[in-house]
Image (tube, grey):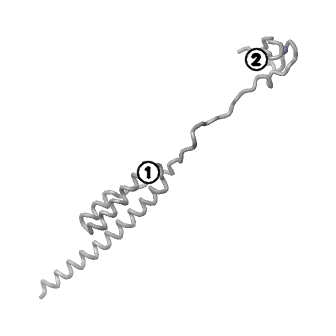
């Protein structure tokens, strides 16, 4: 690639810093734009993999433990996907941990209810 002097128009070899004809500096006359201009605003990047939505556990909790609490777990689980798709990665993580907490609560409550139920029906059999 041959450059041309902006002062006199002389063709100058690429490796020369100054015009061979008039001596004008060429580096300044040929500014190179090396800005990495990015017109797109920075998108929030996903922080790690998509958080678990525990949807299977929510459904199991609904079936085996407690329907109202289980439904609430499913709502939380669905929110994980919804927030993640919206780009709200923090919200997705929060919904994920919330779903997990409620599944545990539902499972423990369901277990207690079942134990009480089995225990009381056993008591009734004794009578
Ligand atoms: Zn020149």
Q: How far from the left and from the top, in percent, is residue 46?
A: 50, 49
For the residue pair 32 and 125, the one nearer the viewer reads as 32
Name the side, left or right, on which 35 lies relative to 126: right
Q: Can you tell which mark lies on residue 84? A: 1
Name the side, left or right, on which 70 lies relative to 79: left
Location of mark 2 (residue): 14
The answer to whether mark 2 is within 8 Å of ligand 1 is: no
Mark in front: 1 vs 2: 1
Secondary structure category for the residue under label 2: loop
Secondary structure category for the residue under label 1: helix
Q: Which residue sits at x=54%, y=45%?
A: 43
Q: Which residue sits at x=27%, y=64%?
A: 62
* Disc 1/disc 2 C-alpha distance (Å): 52 Å
Relative height, residue 40 to residue 52 (above, below): above
Q: Which residue sits at x=76%, y=23%?
A: 30
Relative height, residue 48 to residue 118 (above, below): above
Q: How far from the left and from the top, in percent, is residue 73?
A: 34, 63
Relative height, residue 96 to residue 2 (above, below): below
């Amino acid at each position: 690639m041959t450059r041309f002097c902006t002062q006199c128009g002389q063709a100058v070899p690429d490796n020369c810093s100054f015009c061979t004809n008039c001596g004008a500096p060429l580096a300044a006359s040929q500014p190179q734009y090396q800005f990495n201009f990015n017109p797109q605003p920075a998108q929030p990047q996903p922080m790690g993999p998509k958080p678990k939505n525990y949807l299977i556990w929510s459904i199991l909790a609904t079936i085996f433990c407690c329907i109202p609490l289980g439904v609430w777990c499913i709502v939380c689980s669905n929110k994980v996907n919804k927030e993640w798709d919206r780009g709200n990665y923090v919200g997705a993580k929060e919904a994920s941990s919330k779903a997990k907490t409620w599944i545990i609560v539902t499972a423990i409550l369901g277990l207690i209810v079942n134990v009480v139920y089995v225990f009381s029906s056993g008591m009734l059999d004794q009578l």
